Amino acid sequence: MKQIDFDIIVVGGGHAGVEAVLAASRMGKTSALVTMDGTKLALMSCNPAIGGLGKSHIVKEIDALGGLMGKAIDATGIQFRKLNLSRGPAVWATRAQADRIAYTDYVSKFVADDPNVTVIEATAAAILTVADKAIGIATEDGRKIYSKAVILCTGTFLGGLIHIGETKIPSGRRGEKAAYDLSESLKSLGFEVGRLKTGTPPRIDGKSIDYSRCELQPGIEPIPFFSYATKPYHIEQIPCHLTYTTAQTKDIILRNLLRSPMFSGQIHSIGPRYCPSIEDKINRFSEKPRHQIFLEPEGNGTDEVYPNGFSTSLPEDVQRESIRTVIGLEEAVITKPGYAIEYDYCPAYQIRASLETKKIEGLYFAGQINGTSGYEEAGGQGLVAAVNACLKTDHKPPLILSRAESYIGVMIDDLITHSTTEPYRMFTSRAEYRLRLREDNARDRLFGYAHQLGLIPEKDYNEFIQLQKNTRDEIKRLRKIIVPVSRLDGMAEHFVKKDHISLADLLKVPGITYSDIAHLNGHDGNRGDPDIQVIERTSIRIKYEGYIKKQEREVERFQRMENEIIPEDMPFESLTGLRNEAREKFARFRPTSIGQAGRIEGVTTGDLAALSIHVKKFRALDSAGDNQ
């Protein structure tokens, strides 16, 4: 065994890599962050925003596990919004525009100040192994760095190739070189490597935009910060604007469609379905007269604007011509052209739920290398990979987050049970138990793990235990306070068949809020009104109590299936009574439970029944052998 330089090596300084090294540090491990440029950590190479539908839930979970993303956006955000407030709390989401440069500076300084983290500016070229176990990496400049575990967070740098019209540029990000040797190293170790694509819009000089022709999109007050640790403070929020493409936009793009690498055959890989290029949108939805474009400022110290919805890889001359047909952008000046980028990834059937690879012990994948898209998805994976790498070095069992307790668990389970054909993006619709996976209860779900693993300060944990107690006490209090319906003034028509009602039941009535019952609260004078967090938590728990209890019963059934464990050495290839498709998929994905096997695409209830019988027989034979 070679000399150990670090406990953990993390390759890649994006959002996954940053969360990985910081989680390892919180668990008392030394780590090397190998990245091409230590001043560009967690750089927002695409949209300058954090959160959004489904994604904000992951940010809250990262925060509940002690991660940095929520704190970083709270410190550098320039506009905050709440989405889906007209619907139930399961799909409420927070989204914040970032000062792009300030965000990267904040993260880079945070990492640089961590005594357990060493930033090494280099390009990883190969994984060093002994007997199918990762022992470190080799860099392109000839260095060898040794460790107990390696985490690859390569983003779009792995075999990256930028496309702008007919022009192709080997690059991992605008103006930065790609990593090609590492792809070859993975292939030589036996990994399947595929290609995916993503893209970004041109950037526009904000001084050339006529905002008077666009719709104002302001932030909201009070500011809905992401991190539980952020103390409320005031910022002057910068507005975004909404505008639209026109018939002229459509005409120009359709005339130049074959100059787009997506349509000329230059790009063969698949991009994210839910974030298509403008040429793809106009081609696929030709019946639509216009498409939304959100004009998002990139920060306080720049006039550069991100036209969200105008991602493109068309030639620069077509980009300039077409962007000037968008309402309000008639005089727009492009500061940087948009582009598409192809990159290598490893289909995620090759990793376990711990994010450790099946082929190489001690090697973990996190982020876009697993086929995902988005800063939030990457950050969640980086954190989980690091936690499990640290647990592995301590000879402890991994942390496996289930899809019933976190969006991170939903994401990882989806990745390891589905064939990745396009970049994966999180949505609330992917979580079947989303009513219990809300933004507001991320700490209820994950703070216990964070405390056990040493990811959060003891003081934070104790304060949260008190918050939970205060919430329970307030719920009990509202259930005990019974008021006559005659005192309810305009609300009385809801209760024509009742003489009295508890405040808890009153709060369940649609449209009635905590503030509506404040005058009926009956405080004893020795205590003030509850903390705003207690009010919010109490309101949601009472209002949705029936639905939450129903979902808890569904989760119990889910857990029974998850607890039917499949032995690790199950010979899937030779099992009888299964359809060929199921046998092949079980052998490829190697599910760890009957529940997980049932989520593999193409598997039927008959396949599951047959598999369950085989598992019982296998266990019986195994037990008989042990008793001999």
Image (tube, rainbow, N blue to C red):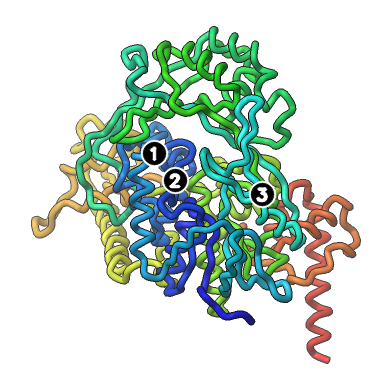
- Check disc 2 and report the residue beneath it: 43
Q: Which amino acid does label 2 sit on?
A: Leu
Q: Quadrant of the C terminus?
A: bottom right
- The nearer-to-camera label among 1 and 2 is 2
Q: How crowded is mark 2: few (under 14 residues within 10 Å), some or many (20 or more)?
A: many
**Is there CB contact under 8 Å for labels 1 and 2?**
no
Q: What element carries label 3?
A: strand
Label at residue 345: 3
Mark 1 / mark 2, whichever is N-terminal: 2
Q: Is residue 167 left or right of residue 216?
A: right
Label at residue 95: 1
Q: In this view, does 51 lie to the left or right of 529?
A: right
Residue lying at the far left of the rendered structure = 525
Above or below: residue 339 compared with residue 321: below
Residue in the picture at 69% in, 45% down: 420
Above or below: residue 232 compared with residue 149: above
Q: Position of residue 94 (x, y in %)?
A: 38, 41
